[in-house]
Image (cartoon, rainbow, N blue to C red):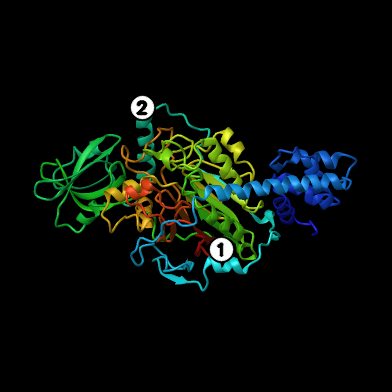
Amino acid sequence: MPLETPSRIVSELASRGYNAEREAVTLLAGAPEPALALEAAIEHAPDDALRITTEHVRAVLDADGAPDAPTAPGADAATATGSARKGAGASLQDDAESANEHPSVSTGTAGSRSGGSEGDAPVETKESNDDLTAAGTTAAESTAAQSPSSAHDRDPSLRSLEIANDMTGQSTGTGEYKHFVRTFRDRYERLSGLLRGRVNHRPAESIQHMAGGEDASMIGLVNDVRSTASGHWLIELEDTTGTFPALVMKDKGIADMVEEIMMDECIAIDGTLADDSGILFADSIHFPDIPRTHKPSTADRHVQAALISDVHVGSDEFMADAWHRFAEWLHTDEAEHVEYLLICGDMVEGVGVYPDQDEELDIVDIYEQYETFAEHLKEVPGDMEIVMIPGNHDAVRLAEPQPGFDEELREIMAAHDARIVSNPATVTVEGVSILMYHGVSLDEVIAELPEEKASYDEPHKAMYQLLKKRHVAPQYGGHVRMAPEEKDYLTIDEVPDVFHTGHVHKLGWGKYHNVLAVNSGCWQAQTDFQKSVNIDPDAGYAPILDLDTLEMTVRKFS
């Protein structure tokens, strides 16, 4: 096979069991005889090498200008070594899958998988109100009909990928009280700025000196929400000057909005002061929210991104067979336009995350879990752009924002030169901004809000609430642990085009004010712990996003 394109070089290396650095692939493609250069680079690489580096390629290209053809024994040895690695990877997949049978991801009720359809048919989102149309064949049927194609003709020069809000290596907080004050003050300043154009804000200290009966508006962080003996709601707001109470009468139309309010979020209240100026009678409540006029950006060409999360390698219930089918599909002609893979946390199962977790582990060493994950990641086409953020099962601090993995773990997962960034982070892919957040706060939202506003069966509705609050984890002191920093990295300053989360192991998607919210499910069948807490996961799915239209297809590989 001629190796005139980088993608074909990557595919040839993958067939030998190798991956490669991007610059190494570029050098090979530019060599006078790419095929001979590739063989020589493989022969030059150490026997235990997992990838071809730029150093390996330069060594053979700099020797007399161009490589000679390797001798037959050397070529055979290199091929045999690559085949052995490939075989080892296959056995890891087989060992990691405890059984082919796994609990159904269905909740047993029609339509409970949000946005989904019955059976295995992939579905597409085409409208902002969760309206769906079914595609004609299942992903499994489609994959079976395609022979793996390792020669995607992709042009990396057309790609663009930018990262914003990555706090990796920038942590400054030590947990002192003053650092928490600094973080909340930053939250207030940034979110209140989004509300000041809608209300005539007065500081709490100023309102306290206003005359009774005057109209007043205040922007503040929610310091307290409680019901009175007569069924009304009392909301205490706090700004940088003090606190002030507002009363929402139970017969007011805005009373239902109180059910959506969470502690520590930033809101604005308009109303009229009582005669004694001691309380504000609320007439309206405002959230920072996403403007209804938001128009998302799209890519200038037809290109796709796969959105996945919660792989959980190391668990007894990691679905290696489903992952293998997904990776194989990525090599087919049908997946030719899937050039990006965005993984939203929990690459591994971790150790000691929940009680008696060790009884459900297939791999008990955390580093071995990441090494096995890296082997599975090598099945993905080598020319794909990969972005990963950590989750609560990963080997980073639990407090959010979570920095990207340390250098030791990065080296273990270095095969694809993946971009490893913090949780949360905003990834702009060919002009489309994608807010990636693992999603621990979804537990909080679902616990605090009425079921029709947020539930595990419809996780995207809980995501709508975070978009409305313009903060990925507004409530402090519950499920989410917060690390105080110089700024609040959890604030949603810029409106994203796509909001991608994981964590709850449920599949759900829809549009909120033209922002596509996607919770991408998981790759772990139901564990005993999940059974004990009534979690029925949606496992083995891969949402595929068209970046040029923001339409989405969900493919099932389990």
Q: Identify the residue shown where x is 53% and y is 33%.
A: 169
Dot 2: within a 10 Å radius of its alpha carbon, few (fewer than 14), some, or many (20 or more) residues?
few
The three-letter code of the residue at mark 1 reads Asp
The mark that comes first in sequence, 2 or 1, is 2
Along the horizontal axis of the image, is 446 left or right of 485?
left
Residue 306 makes an appearance in the image: yes
State the image coordinates of residue 461 (x, y, percent, origin top left): 35, 57
Identify residue for label 1. 548
Q: Identify the residue shown where x is 36% and y is 66%.
A: 111
Q: CA distance from mark 2 to mark 1?
A: 45 Å
Query: What quarter of the picture does the N terminus occupy?
Result: bottom right
State the image coordinates of residue 312 (x, y, percent, origin top left): 48, 46
The three-letter code of the residue at mark 2 reads Lys
Dot 1: within a 10 Å radius of its alpha carbon, few (fewer than 14), some, or many (20 or more) residues?
some
In this view, the residue in front, 311 or 226, is 311
In this view, the residue in front, 25 or 189, is 25
Along the horizontal axis of the image, is 341 left or right of 454?
right
State the image coordinates of residue 403 (x, y, percent, origin top left): 49, 37
Along the horizontal axis of the image, is 209 left or right of 530?
left
Q: Quadrant of residue 454?
A: bottom left
Relative to 188, does residue 289 appear above or below in the rendering? below
In this view, the residue in front, 227 or 508, is 508
Judging from the image, what secondary structure is the residue with disc 1 in? loop
Along the horizontal axis of the image, is 114 left or right of 373?
left
Q: How many discs mark residues in the rendered view? A: 2
Identify residue for label 2. 178
Q: Identify the residue shown where x is 43% and y is 32%.
A: 486
State the image coordinates of residue 371 (x, y, percent, origin top left): 58, 40
The extreme bottom residue here reads: 136
The extreme left residue here reads: 230
